[in-house]
Amino acid sequence: MGPIISWVRAAGGWVRSPFGDLPALRADDAMTHQTWLILAGGMALILSRASKAELETRYAATRQVYAVARARLEKKRLPKPEATLLRDALHEIANLADPMTKEAGRECLMRVVERLARKSGAPAPVSSNPPHSSQSTASHTTGQAPLTPTAAAPAPEPERDHAETQLDLDLLFERSNKLRGTVATARSTTFGPDT
């Protein structure tokens, strides 16, 4: 009888992930709230598939953003992660996230940067689409400008011998994903005879 009881009490093959609780979208929620729910759900799915070691190393920013998002969304409040933390989290999940999660991530990042710009009085990134649009067209420069605007007076513009490069956010994400894929392929390729 003892072995049967110990077998029943033993952990089974199914171990519940702490990230398995996916949010449900409700039609009466604001579009911004729904966008954050989509992002949180996509992050939860990726985090639920990661090992403990990966959670601590590879997905550190994603875990932090997910924790902030979940805590605030459960109270029907919008998450307010730091822009750099959200950007890092989006980079961590870029190769694994589904298209809806990626799009929601771009929209959330754009809103966070716009909120910070409004707070500091700096001009917000230009967007030709309304906030509820499914495509974001915010432009980013490839210069050394920080992601979050600073409250200090702007420094005088240094003389440049070329025009500043403007790159569409969607194009930037697309090219960075292609670069990641190329690097991953190069790392997995072996050259010469296997020994």
Image (tube, helix red, strand yellow):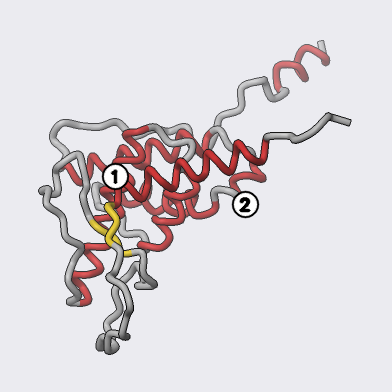
Q: Secondary structure at mark 2?
A: helix
Q: Earlier in the sequence, mark 1 or mark 2?
A: 1
Relative to 106, residue 188 above or below: above
Q: Which mark is residue 193?
A: none
Which x, y percent locates residue 2?
A: 82, 15
Q: CA separation, marks 1 and 2?
A: 24 Å
Q: Which residue is mark 2?
A: 57
Circle 2: residue type: Thr
Relative to 163, residue 104 above or below: above
Residue occupying the point 19% across, 39% down:
134
Quarter location, residue 85:
bottom left
Relative to 22, residue 180 above or below: below
Q: Which mark is residue 36?
A: 1
Quarter location, residue 153:
bottom left
Residue occupying the point 75% across, 35% down:
191
Which x, y percent locates residue 14?
A: 61, 22
Residue occupying the point 32% across, 80% down:
160
